[in-house]
Amino acid sequence: MKIHATESALEPATEAAIKHWWTGKAPPDCPGYDPQGFLRALPQLEFQGIHRQNLLDYFDNGWTLTELLFSALQSEEAFTTAPKHGLRHPLIFYYGHPAVLYVNKLRVAGLVKDPIDEYLEKILDVGVDEMSWDDMSKNEMRWPLVSEIQDYRRKVYNLVKDLILNDPRLDPKQVSFSQSSPAWALVMGFEHERIHLETSSVLLRELPLHFMRRPEAWPLNDKTVYEAPLEELIQVKETTVEVGKPLNYPSFGWDNEYGHRRITVPALELGRHLLSNAQFLEFVNAGGYRNLKYWSTEGWAWRSYRNTKAPCFWEPLGPGGLHQYKIRTIFEVVDFRPDWPAVVNFHEAEAYCAWRTEHDDSSIPYRLPSEAEIQSLRSLVPKKGKWNLDLVSGSECSAFCFSSEGVFDLYGNLWQWCEDHFNPLPGFQMHPYYEDFSSPCFDGRHQMILGGSFASTGDETSPFARFHFRPHFHQHAGFRIARSLSQESASTAIHLNIEKLSQPASYESLELLSQYLLLHFGEASESLFDFKEAPFSALGFPQRCADKLLAATKRLGLQLDSVLDIGCAVGGSSFQLSEHFKTVVGVDLSSSFISTAELLRSRSEVTYLRKDQGELTTKLIARLPKNSRPERVRFLEGDACDLPKELINFDAVLMANLLCRLPDPRACLEAMGGARSVVKPGGLLVLVSPYSWLEQHTNPASWLGGRIIKGSAISSADEIKNILRHEFRLIEVDNLPLIIREHERKYQFIISHLMIWQRRT
């Protein structure tokens, strides 16, 4: 079903559909439409001398740019097809999300009292990053129709337009656009929409081409060609830089831009230009994607999981070994452009630097620059001239602008990866209108990006802009190389301590992942040292947990429709249950566990390395159980203490070795029944736990038993019985041993306690 098209010679009915598509202004009527017939972004809104018409023009420009981008999609399926990597929602979410944020933030600021559509304003509220709270299971839900969100957008447009033109609280002659003003929420909506204009354009770039056509008012790709300078590196003298946006600066800024840091940056060498496709092709041709030594542990894990062999937007021509490619832009595939900057993620950029150090036999390693080092380069080159920002071009292109100092693309073209973790500046304060915009990402798992891209508009183009992405994400981002001038001269990059910031990070190492693959899928000969006293009865723990659940359901004559495996790890129990249950959902907080389980589900086997002794390892293959039905299984990254709202009414729930790793195990158990009712009446709850309570996972005040309370010793089993006895009856108790191999002569032998509960009807 075709939804709409762009401006062209069409039949009258189709012309009417085009006119109906625009919920605000059509591109020819919109501020920013140029004589060449393209809609460009207006420069960032400045508060000095501002009028209501300035606000309306800036709003219209961003609103119509969003609808111009989404006009490329030609069917309902195009809107609802999830990205192939599964880390973002389908595009239908991002079509509605900016409008929803307008309403929600205007309500927080007191400019709007009532919702327009409570359901849409709930399901389309959060979805920027694959955080632990980000409910990616919503990709499985029934999404609203395009027409439903289109109608909603029309209502929001009229609401915001009326506020801009008529609300006295937004009159620039009477109201200061300060951070404490309700007017700040309006401009926050403007800038939020512009962020999603860019991130949505990346999602379109990942979508199959048959779903779209290029909008005619979208700017063309620039054809500029340049020759790279002979001297690739430029020396930057030692300098002191100031990072942070003044509080009284007359434009909007996100909370992470404010604060102040003064840093002395030692002299160094920086790339004059962003690394080109031609340069990155050398790394690919040299086998860079096949050689572990160039990659970080996390980077190699990502490369292996995705079976990545070249940058995401390089489309191979013929067999992979030929290393011949075309380039995928947002709307089309074009010939390989060696002069364009390479679009890569952080892991690929880091790996290139390691390879380049070896290739050049450099005594001082190449690396990515820090935020402060890019700022030191900016001190040589003020932000002036015509950079590839604000949709001057419809894609990245040859180095678009260079300064008199010979520096290319200091701003625009592509974002630039930094060595720094995303971090707060001294004096950082969360803004009350959007408390979770930045602070959840100060976690040591997000990398800084600076400079903006061709699709960056508004605040993203500001020299104060500080943005971030997870290192495995693809954005319109590339990098320039850096190198210190001496071994003693360290980078000024800021790295956050992941272990202190985020407990779940301990579950992300490759070594632990390998241990769990062996626990879940290892054969006896692979799992235990060859001696007769080995506890062979402790093997196959995930499968034995599943078998206990299955035996109880059959004994009681219960339905075998749906089962939820909470804390599924790499999926051993989930796959075992799939032979008998029609629907199996596995949930785990660890992204590496879920990625591996999903890879196993789709490919039937995964290769991993078992640790034997020191650096000695053995290559093993984890395979799906013989009678498993992987098509019945889906895996979600999620928090057991805050499960996605649609995970309810399961015939059975399994929680194996999970309770004593949760920050709030009581809340998790209470959610099994009650109003939420994860376990349906008559269904089973299977709890397996060694009760290994540790402060690093659970505050002692939240332990279930294992403590002296009012002079009495309370066991975990007794505490669990007190929590569940009103809604569940205990039908079976047992002990289940398990063994975890650390290396060939060290094992963890654990005896977990099994309780099977049936919910009362």
Image (cartoon, grey):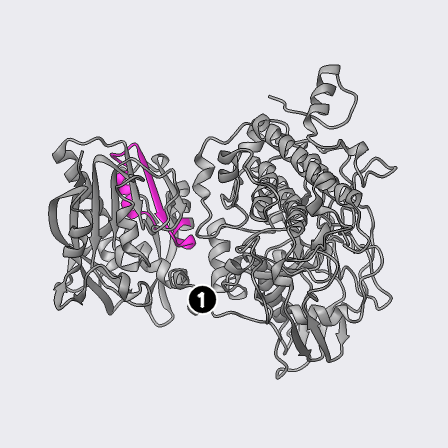
Quadrant housing the N terminus: top right
Whether 349 is among the magenta residues is: no
State the image coordinates of residue 234 (x, y, percent, origin top left).
77, 72
Is 696 in front, or is 325? 696
Q: Please tell me which residue is depicted at 60% across the width and 67% down the height of the picture.
A: 419
Q: Please state the horizontal and vertical placement of residue 188, each as a whole percent of the image.
A: 65, 50
How far across and down, in percent of the image, does residue 186 sit?
Answer: 66, 47
Residue in front for this viewpoint, 690 or 25: 25
Residue 131 visible to an observer of this rendering = yes
Q: Which residue lies under the disc numbered 1? A: 501
Span shown in magenta: 570-594
Q: Quadrant of the C terminus?
A: top left
User: 127 left or right of 561?
Assistant: right
Q: Position of residue 513 (x, y in %)?
A: 37, 58
Q: Is residue 111 left or right of residue 436?
A: right
Is there any visible trace of residue 277 in the rendered image?
A: no
Figure check: 463 above or below 731: below
Packing grade of label 1 (10 A; few <14, some 14-19, many >=20) is few
Quadrant hosting residue 176: bottom right
Q: Is residue 340 above or below residue 206?
A: below
**Mark count:** 1
Image point (48%, 61%), residue name? 298
Q: Amino acid at mark 1?
A: Leu
- Residue 531, quarter of picture: bottom left
